[in-house]
Image (spheres, rainbow, N blue to C red):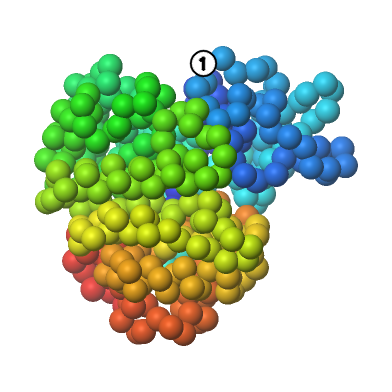
Amino acid sequence: MIIDTHTYCFPPLDGANGGEERMKRAQVAHALHHQPALRLRDREPAPSGPLAPEGTLDVSDLPDVDFHVEHEAGRVVWTVDGEDYTKYYYPPSLRDLQYTPQALIGDMDYAGVDVALLHTDPMLERHGAFQAECVSAYPDRILSMAPVDEWRIPSEPDAVIEELTENIRQRRLHAIKFMASYAYTNGPEPWDDGVYRPFWEAATALGVPVFFSLGSGPTGSWTDAASERQNYLNELRILARWSERYPDTLCSVTHGFPWRLFLDGDSIVLPEGVWTPFRSPNCSIEVSFPVRIGDLFDFPYRQVWLALEQMVERIGARQLLWGTDMPFQNRFCTYRQSRDWIEKYCDFLSEEDLRLIMGETAARVLGIRSARS
């Protein structure tokens, strides 16, 4: 069984489900993302700084740059001093900037993917009802995480817990998504304890895995590459502490490691500290390279093979899950190629390694018991 543990479905960015809040989240996300901005007149590179203050997730006071959607072109556009700009954070094939469950299933069928796990994101979709609708359209093939408004936990813990419980117990979503960077919008307090403790006590009692997206620590801590690497390693230590506190809850790190932070020329050099949380057999990590560094390296990504081999040696294939970030990985390769680079080219992987990475580990983490080939 082939299971993609990192996919999305979402309605149009400026549609009824989104509104002003989602557009603001998208504006900040486009400001921070590493994809280059382009001036539409001549496609020359341009800065993203005018979209939002660099290094912050704050949406309370964004500059007015007429940030809007060009529906037919499938892209966002903003205007500064009479010039129009865009950034292909969304892949350019999406009309209306939406990705329906039907579109996902079509891509899965063509690529030979059996099951997909939906993620959530403030820029894309944060409503449990929408996620549940996607699951109900294809209940044997689409699973979904439940969203969490991390920034509301310190001030509205009971409300956030109630929403999460409804999404897991009533809407029967399959996992919890926690984006640590959004927790830091309230201050530098670590997200594993303190005011977050009541939330985690309730969340872990729901009996589903927790998927963590880790950033570079408290908002505003981005200073230089060395500091950012250290901040990320601190986040991994927090995760290890969290995992020790909740030993009965399975967890996983989304996206893999932030590969761009660990580049040394054409190689990825991983420091010893990245392995810390995975000493626990309950903590897994996503194998996801093309979406994060596909602009730097070409298929079949030979430059990352050593990093994957190290992950198998140091973590073990039983704690590795394949994920693509569909449809966003389409910026750099096809869905089928996101399978092929692992299955056809990484000859250091055994048949058992491949079975685990491409589906069996995910099936265990998500409690999928049916054995489809």
Q: Residue at x 43, y 58 (%)?
A: 271
Q: Residue at x 13, y 35 (%)?
A: 201
Quadrant in which the N terminus is drawn = bottom left
Closest to the observer, 261 or 152: 261
Residue 75 quadrant: top right
Residue at the limit of the structure toward the right, as seen here:
42
**Residue labelled with disc 1:** 60
Residue 363 quadrant: bottom left
Q: Amino acid at mark 1?
A: Ser
Q: For mark 1, does the 10 Å Cα neighbourhood hold few (<14), some (14 to 19), or many (20 or more) residues?
A: few
Q: Position of residue 36 (x, y in %)?
A: 70, 44
Q: Residue at x 62, y 25 (%)?
A: 52
Q: Position of residue 296 (x, y in %)?
A: 65, 60
Regarding residue 1, the answer to whether it shows in the image is no
Q: Residue at x 31, y 66 (%)?
A: 315
Closest to the observer, 163 or 290: 290
Closest to the observer, 199 or 233: 233
Element type where label 1 sits in the image: loop
